[in-house]
Image (tube, rainbow, N blue to C red):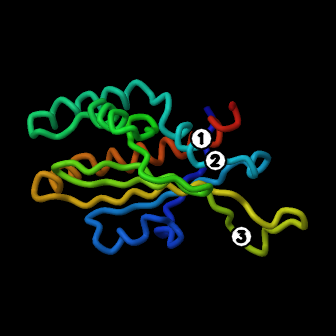
Amino acid sequence: MATAPVRKVPFPGESRLQPLYKSAYFIDAFAVTLPRQQATTYKPHAVARAFFDNPPAWFSLLMWIRDHIMSIFGVKGSTQIQAEAVKRGMDTVSVFPVISSTDKEIILGEDDSHLNFSISIMIRDVEQPTSTVKEDDEKETELVSTTVVHCHGWLGRAYLAVIGPFHVFIVKYNLARLPGKIMKQ
């Protein structure tokens, strides 16, 4: 599958996660430009599903390892997170509960014993630099994925130290492939 360039971007000030930035233990934001021909039809919920659905086998293996190791410490497994959300009547995207949704942003997340995390999948229009603007083509659409984590004690910090590099790799991997996934829909 073709890939698109992924950029590290400033934390979006227009995100509903913005109030959580200052107190976060960990925060990152990455963006990818979305195909223009469908720009008016992007819905955050559908784009989030494309972002998370059909993970590669190596990702499923990493999640299985994570779930088994962290269960020793009483941390919820991914399927448990999803099952509890469904039991509470919440919508989910992949295993993640939907916390809130607007026409431009969906917030996923979970509060657990070791940490609280929130993920924003935001669609926004971005002005192109003047040198690249064409007469009828003034804006491009991008998806910004922002992750905010608040740790609870040593277990949360240790967990994040171990999975942090995997998190960044997986977010970039999924973002790079997202435009191709969307084009196939």
Name the foreground residue: 178 vs 114. 114
- Residue at image position (29%, 35%) is 84
Do callouts 2 and 1 mark residues in contact (Cβ within 8 Å)? Answer: yes
Give the Cα distance between marks 1 and 3.
Answer: 24 Å
Name the secondary structure under disc 3. strand
Q: Name the residue under label 2.
A: 43
Q: Mark 1 points at which residue?
A: 46
Q: What is the x, y in percent for residue 75?
A: 17, 40
The nearer-to-camera label among 2 and 3 is 2
Say which label, 2 or 3, has the lower sequence index: 2
Q: Name the residue under label 3.
A: 127
Give the Cα distance between marks 2 and 3.
Answer: 20 Å
User: Where on the picture, by quarter, is residue 22?
Assistant: bottom left
Give, as a three-letter code, the residue at label 2. Answer: Lys
62 in relation to 119, above or below: above
Left or right: 127 in relation to 104: right
Name the secondary structure under disc 2. loop
- Numbered-mark total: 3
